[in-house]
Image: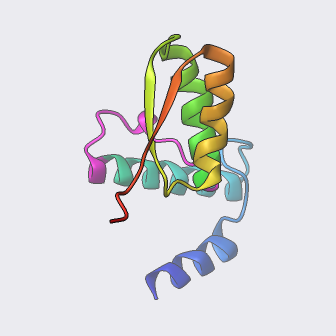
Amino acid sequence: MQVIQAIERYYSEYNANVHRSIQRLSEGSTIAFERSREKFARFIGAKNPKEIVFVRNATEALNLVVLSWARANLKPGDSVLLTEMEHHSNIVPWLILAKERGIKLFRLRQDHR
């Protein structure tokens, strides 16, 4: 019920883009957005709310991690371990990075005895 009420409040009180304007709706939306970032940072123990990045879905999050952090930090010969249960959205960016950077991908297989 809380989620439904929060969605209703968003659409009725501050349905606007965050960080885009000084008009009332956008300011309200920005305040709500930043408060949620602060709450989530406290919840997971982040040092700074600016460390929290909201994305649309898991695929976008995985691409962001692989194609930004991993691209900047992994070197040829480094290894990445994936499981055989990975969704293709978590395999494809690693395959791209492996081809691009020469990292080694290993797949953890379940023993099916």
Q: Compared with residue 50, is residue 2 higher up or lower down, i.e. above or below? A: below
Q: Compared with residue 107, is residue 78 higher up or lower down, i.e. above or below? A: above
Find out whether residue 55 is within the magenta segment: yes
Which residue reaches farthest front? 113
Task: Find residue 23 and report its horizontal and vertical position in percent.
Answer: 73, 50
**Residue at horizontal 59 percent and vertical 15 percent from the top:** 102
- Dominant SS type (magenta): loop
Report the magenta residues as a range.
Answer: 42-57
**Residue at horizontal 69 percent and vertical 29 percent from the top:** 96
Q: Nearer the viewer, residue 61 or 82?
A: 82
Q: Nearer the viewer, residue 23 or 6?
A: 6
Task: Find residue 59 and report its horizontal and vertical position in percent.
Answer: 63, 50
In the image, is 23 to the left or to the right of 75?
right
**Residue at horizontal 66 percent and vertical 48 percent from the top:** 18
Count of numbered tags: 0
Find out whether residue 104 is within the magenta segment: no
Which residue reaches farthest left? 45
Q: Nearer the viewer, residue 83 or 48?
A: 83
In the image, is 23 to the left or to the right of 33?
right
Q: Where is the C terminus found, in terms of image quarters?
A: bottom left
Which residue reaches farthest top? 76
Which residue reaches farthest bottom? 1
Give the image's coloring scheme. rainbow
Q: Compared with residue 81, is residue 83 higher up or lower down, i.e. above or below? A: below
Task: Find residue 53 and report its horizontal and vertical position in percent.
Answer: 52, 42
Task: Find residue 41 and report its horizontal and vertical position in percent.
Answer: 34, 46
**Residue at horizontal 68 percent and vertical 18 percent from the top:** 100
In the image, is 99 to the left or to the right of 41?
right
Q: Nearer the viewer, residue 86 or 40?
A: 86
